[in-house]
Protein backbone atom coordinates (compact mmCIF):
# COMPACT_ATOMS: atom_id res chain seq x y z
CA UNK A 1 0.00 0.00 0.00
CA UNK A 2 3.03 2.26 0.14
CA UNK A 3 3.96 1.90 -3.54
CA UNK A 4 4.04 5.30 -5.23
CA UNK A 5 1.17 6.12 -7.59
CA UNK A 6 1.48 8.80 -10.25
CA UNK A 7 -1.42 11.28 -10.35
CA UNK A 8 -2.24 12.88 -13.69
CA UNK A 9 -4.27 16.02 -14.04
CA UNK A 10 -7.44 15.79 -16.17
CA UNK A 11 -5.33 16.85 -19.16
CA UNK A 12 -2.89 13.97 -18.48
CA UNK A 13 -0.16 16.23 -17.13
CA UNK A 14 1.70 14.41 -14.32
CA UNK A 15 1.36 16.54 -11.19
CA UNK A 16 1.90 14.52 -8.06
CA UNK A 17 2.87 11.22 -6.45
CA UNK A 18 0.84 9.61 -3.67
CA UNK A 19 0.68 6.19 -2.06
CA UNK A 20 -1.65 3.35 -3.04
CA UNK A 21 -4.04 3.89 -0.13
CA UNK A 22 -4.68 7.50 -1.11
CA UNK A 23 -4.98 6.58 -4.80
CA UNK A 24 -7.64 3.95 -4.07
CA UNK A 25 -9.45 6.49 -1.89
CA UNK A 26 -9.51 8.94 -4.79
CA UNK A 27 -10.87 6.26 -7.13
CA UNK A 28 -13.57 5.07 -4.68
CA UNK A 29 -14.72 8.64 -4.12
CA UNK A 30 -14.83 9.07 -7.92
CA UNK A 31 -12.36 11.93 -7.87
CA UNK A 32 -9.95 9.95 -10.03
CA UNK A 33 -10.00 7.04 -12.41
CA UNK A 34 -7.58 4.23 -13.01
CA UNK A 35 -5.26 4.73 -15.96
CA UNK A 36 -2.74 1.95 -15.42
CA UNK A 37 -3.01 -1.06 -13.18
CA UNK A 38 -0.17 -3.47 -13.71
CA UNK A 39 0.19 -4.38 -10.04
CA UNK A 40 -2.52 -6.97 -9.53
CA UNK A 41 -5.41 -6.65 -7.14
CA UNK A 42 -6.17 -6.12 -3.52
CA UNK A 43 -8.95 -8.27 -2.04
CA UNK A 44 -11.31 -7.34 0.71
CA UNK A 45 -14.06 -9.53 2.14
CA UNK A 46 -16.66 -8.34 -0.31
CA UNK A 47 -14.74 -7.48 -3.47
CA UNK A 48 -11.37 -6.83 -5.08
CA UNK A 49 -9.84 -3.63 -6.38
CA UNK A 50 -7.12 -3.15 -8.97
CA UNK A 51 -3.90 -1.78 -7.53
CA UNK A 52 -3.23 1.44 -9.42
CA UNK A 53 0.11 2.59 -10.76
CA UNK A 54 -1.19 5.66 -12.58
CA UNK A 55 -4.48 7.48 -11.94
CA UNK A 56 -6.07 10.54 -13.50
CA UNK A 57 -8.10 13.23 -11.77
CA UNK A 58 -11.65 13.66 -13.08
CA UNK A 59 -11.52 17.43 -12.66
CA UNK A 60 -8.73 19.68 -13.75
CA UNK A 61 -6.87 21.21 -10.82
CA UNK A 62 -4.79 24.32 -11.19
CA UNK A 63 -1.59 24.52 -9.28
CA UNK A 64 1.29 26.90 -9.00
CA UNK A 65 4.23 26.21 -11.23
CA UNK A 66 6.52 23.66 -9.59
CA UNK A 67 9.94 25.01 -8.76
CA UNK A 68 13.10 23.07 -8.04
CA UNK A 69 14.29 23.61 -4.50
CA UNK A 70 17.63 25.32 -4.29
CA UNK A 71 19.88 22.79 -2.55
CA UNK A 72 23.55 21.90 -2.91
CA UNK A 73 22.64 18.65 -4.61
CA UNK A 74 20.35 20.35 -7.14
CA UNK A 75 22.95 23.00 -7.95
CA UNK A 76 25.58 20.31 -8.60
CA UNK A 77 23.05 18.37 -10.68
CA UNK A 78 22.17 21.49 -12.73
CA UNK A 79 25.88 22.16 -13.32
CA UNK A 80 26.62 18.53 -14.27
CA UNK A 81 28.94 18.14 -11.29
CA UNK A 82 31.39 20.42 -13.08
CA UNK A 83 33.22 23.44 -11.70
CA UNK A 84 31.68 26.41 -13.52
CA UNK A 85 34.96 28.34 -13.49
CA UNK A 86 37.58 25.84 -14.69
CA UNK A 87 35.30 23.20 -16.22
CA UNK A 88 36.72 20.36 -14.21
CA UNK A 89 34.56 17.41 -13.18
CA UNK A 90 35.01 17.14 -9.47
CA UNK A 91 33.81 15.19 -6.47
CA UNK A 92 35.12 18.03 -4.33
CA UNK A 93 32.57 20.67 -5.30
CA UNK A 94 31.44 23.64 -3.28
CA UNK A 95 28.73 26.23 -3.77
CA UNK A 96 30.05 29.62 -4.84
CA UNK A 97 27.95 32.77 -4.57
CA UNK A 98 28.90 34.77 -7.67
CA UNK A 99 28.22 38.04 -5.91
CA UNK A 100 29.42 37.19 -2.40
CA UNK A 101 26.80 37.23 0.31
CA UNK A 102 28.66 39.84 2.35
CA UNK A 103 28.39 42.13 -0.69
CA UNK A 104 24.63 41.62 -0.86
CA UNK A 105 24.56 38.59 -3.18
CA UNK A 106 21.37 36.57 -2.85
CA UNK A 107 21.06 32.84 -2.33
CA UNK A 108 19.20 32.23 -5.60
CA UNK A 109 19.66 30.15 -8.73
CA UNK A 110 21.18 32.97 -10.77
CA UNK A 111 23.78 33.75 -8.11
CA UNK A 112 25.06 30.26 -7.26
CA UNK A 113 27.31 27.92 -9.19
CA UNK A 114 29.19 24.72 -8.51
CA UNK A 115 32.89 25.47 -8.00
CA UNK A 116 35.82 23.23 -7.18
CA UNK A 117 37.47 24.09 -3.90
CA UNK A 118 40.53 25.39 -5.78
CA UNK A 119 38.51 27.95 -7.78
CA UNK A 120 36.35 28.85 -4.80
CA UNK A 121 39.48 29.51 -2.77
CA UNK A 122 41.04 31.52 -5.60
CA UNK A 123 37.96 33.71 -5.92
CA UNK A 124 37.63 34.14 -2.18
CA UNK A 125 35.21 36.82 -1.06
CA UNK A 126 35.64 38.86 -4.23
CA UNK A 127 33.42 39.59 -7.20
CA UNK A 128 34.20 38.04 -10.59
CA UNK A 129 35.68 41.32 -11.81
CA UNK A 130 37.94 41.66 -8.80
CA UNK A 131 39.07 38.06 -9.11
CA UNK A 132 39.31 38.34 -12.92
CA UNK A 133 37.35 35.11 -13.35
CA UNK A 134 34.57 34.05 -15.70
CA UNK A 135 32.00 31.30 -15.56
CA UNK A 136 31.32 28.81 -18.32
CA UNK A 137 27.57 29.28 -18.51
CA UNK A 138 25.20 31.88 -17.19
CA UNK A 139 23.48 30.16 -14.25
CA UNK A 140 19.70 29.81 -14.51
CA UNK A 141 16.92 28.17 -12.57
CA UNK A 142 16.55 24.60 -13.90
CA UNK A 143 13.25 23.85 -15.66
CA UNK A 144 10.85 21.88 -13.49
CA UNK A 145 9.94 19.45 -16.24
CA UNK A 146 8.11 16.27 -15.30
CA UNK A 147 11.19 14.28 -16.28
CA UNK A 148 13.29 16.33 -13.85
CA UNK A 149 10.72 16.20 -11.03
CA UNK A 150 9.46 12.60 -11.33
CA UNK A 151 12.49 11.00 -13.00
CA UNK A 152 13.83 9.63 -9.71
CA UNK A 153 10.86 7.23 -9.52
CA UNK A 154 11.58 5.62 -12.88
CA UNK A 155 13.93 2.97 -11.50
CA UNK A 156 11.08 1.62 -9.42
CA UNK A 157 8.19 2.56 -11.73
CA UNK A 158 9.49 2.34 -15.28
CA UNK A 159 5.91 2.03 -16.57
CA UNK A 160 5.46 5.76 -15.82
CA UNK A 161 7.87 6.81 -18.51
CA UNK A 162 5.32 7.37 -21.33
CA UNK A 163 3.20 9.46 -18.95
CA UNK A 164 6.12 11.68 -17.98
CA UNK A 165 7.88 12.16 -21.29
CA UNK A 166 7.24 15.50 -22.94
CA UNK A 167 5.79 17.38 -19.94
ZN1 LIG B 1 37.49 24.94 -10.69
Image: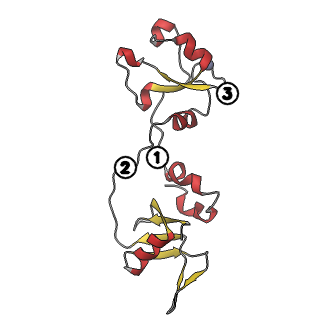
Residue 138 in view, yes or no: no
- CB under 8 Å between callouts 1 and 3? no
Q: CA distance from mark 2 to mark 3?
A: 32 Å
Q: Residue 25: which disc?
A: none
Q: Is residue 123 left or right of residue 63?
A: right
Residue at x 63% of width, y 23% of height: 87
Q: CA distance from mark 2 to mark 1?
A: 8 Å
Tag 1 secondary structure: loop
Q: CA distance from mark 1 to mark 3?
A: 24 Å
Asked if 78 appears above or below 118 in the picture, the reply is below
Asked if 156 appears above or below 45 in the picture, the reply is above
Q: Which residue is mark 2?
A: 65
Mark 1 or 3: the one toward you: 3
- Residue 67 picture location, percent across and down: 41, 44
Residue at x 66% of width, y 27% of height: 90
Q: Earlier in the sequence, mark 1 or mark 3?
A: 3
Mark 3, Cα crowd under 10 Å, few <14 / some 14-19 / many 20+, is: some
Q: Which residue is mark 1?
A: 144
- Residue 161 picture location, percent across and down: 59, 60
- Nearer the observer, 43 or 151: 43
Q: Earlier in the sequence, mark 2 or mark 3?
A: 2
Q: Earlier in the sequence, mark 2 or mark 1?
A: 2
Q: Is residue 100 left or right of residue 122?
A: left
Mark 1, Cα crowd under 10 Å, few <14 / some 14-19 / many 20+, is: some
- CB under 8 Å between callouts 2 and 1? yes
Tag 2 secondary structure: loop
Residue at x 33% of width, y 51% of height: 64
The quarter of the image holding the N terminus is bottom right
Q: Residue 89: which disc?
A: 3
Amino acid sequence: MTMPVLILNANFEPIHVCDTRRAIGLILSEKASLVLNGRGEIKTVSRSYPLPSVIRLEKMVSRPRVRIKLTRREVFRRDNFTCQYCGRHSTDLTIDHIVPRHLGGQHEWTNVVAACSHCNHRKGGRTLEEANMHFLRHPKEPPASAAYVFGRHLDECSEWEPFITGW
